[in-house]
């Protein structure tokens, strides 16, 4: 698979949840360099969906840019951020996390992201 960039926008979709993200994650091309997931107002996306994304991106050795937008998702919390943090590829250079209006994200989730960021070798842009 030669795909090196993927942008997926799924908005206001009650039918999209952790299973869909797991399937997407399993099918990510290994040579992917840029991944942009924009998933606002998908109430069935939970921590398990972020954990599935983490598994998928951890296998992407060439991934240097990750943008993840998850808004208005009550099921996303500290566990999802901890899983995502653990899966961040070490060569990631650009990271953009946009997580507004997710009431279950607390101090522990942000602390987990900070730990993940500290492991990155080449990070030069964080938004």
Image (cartoon, helix red, strand yellow):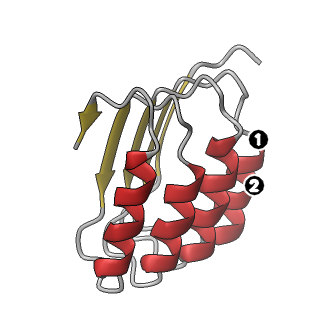
Identify the residue under disc 1: 27
> Residue 14, can we see it?
no
Secondary element at image label 1: loop
Crowd tier of the residue under label 2, counting other residues whose Cα lies within 10 Å: few below 14, some 14–19, many 20 or above: some
Relative depth, front residue between 108 and 76: 108
Task: Give the quadrant of the C terminus.
Answer: top left
Q: Residue furthest top?
A: 2
Q: Is residue 34 above or below residue 15?
A: above
Q: Position of residue 20 (x, y in %)?
A: 68, 61
- Measuring 50% from the left and 68% from the top, which residue is drawn there? 82
Position of residue 5 in the picture relative to residue 125 (left or right): right
**Marker count (numbered):** 2
Q: Position of residue 28 (x, y in %)?
A: 70, 37
- Measuring 46% from the left and 54% from the top, which residue is drawn there? 10
Task: Give the quadrant of the N terminus.
Answer: top right
- Measuring 72% from the left and 29% from the top, which residue is drawn there? 29
Relative depth, front residue between 6 and 118: 118
Identify the residue under disc 2: 23
Q: Position of residue 14 (x, y in %)?
A: 52, 75
- Distance from the alpha carbon under mark 1 to that under mark 2: 6 Å
Secondary element at image label 2: helix
Position of residue 92 in the picture relative to residue 27 (left or right): left
- Measuring 40% from the left and 26% from the top, which residue is drawn there? 122
Q: Is residue 69 above or below residue 75?
A: above
Position of residue 3 in the picture relative to residue 85 (left or right): right
Position of residue 13 in the picture relative to residue 124 (left or right): right
Q: Position of residue 65 (x, y in %)?
A: 43, 30
Q: Is residue 3 above or below residue 55?
A: above
> Residue 88, can we see it?
yes
Q: Is residue 94 above or below residue 68?
A: above
Q: Are dots 1 and 2 in contact, CB under 8 Å?
A: yes
């Amino acid at each position: 698979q030669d795909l090196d960039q993927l942008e997926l926008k799924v908005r206001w979709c009650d039918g999209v949840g952790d299973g869909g993200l797991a399937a997407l994650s399993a099918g990510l091309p290994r040579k992917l360099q840029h991944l942009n997931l924009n998933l606002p107002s998908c109430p069935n996306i939970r921590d398990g969906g972020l954990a599935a994304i983490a598994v998928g991106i951890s296998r992407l050795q060439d991934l240097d840019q990750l943008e993840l937008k998850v808004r208005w998702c009550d099921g996303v919390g500290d566990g999802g951020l901890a899983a995502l943090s653990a899966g961040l590829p070490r060569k990631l250079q650009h990271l953009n996390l946009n997580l507004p209006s997710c009431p279950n994200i607390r101090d522990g989730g942000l602390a987990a992201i900070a730990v993940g960021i500290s492991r990155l070798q080449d990070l030069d842009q964080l938004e």
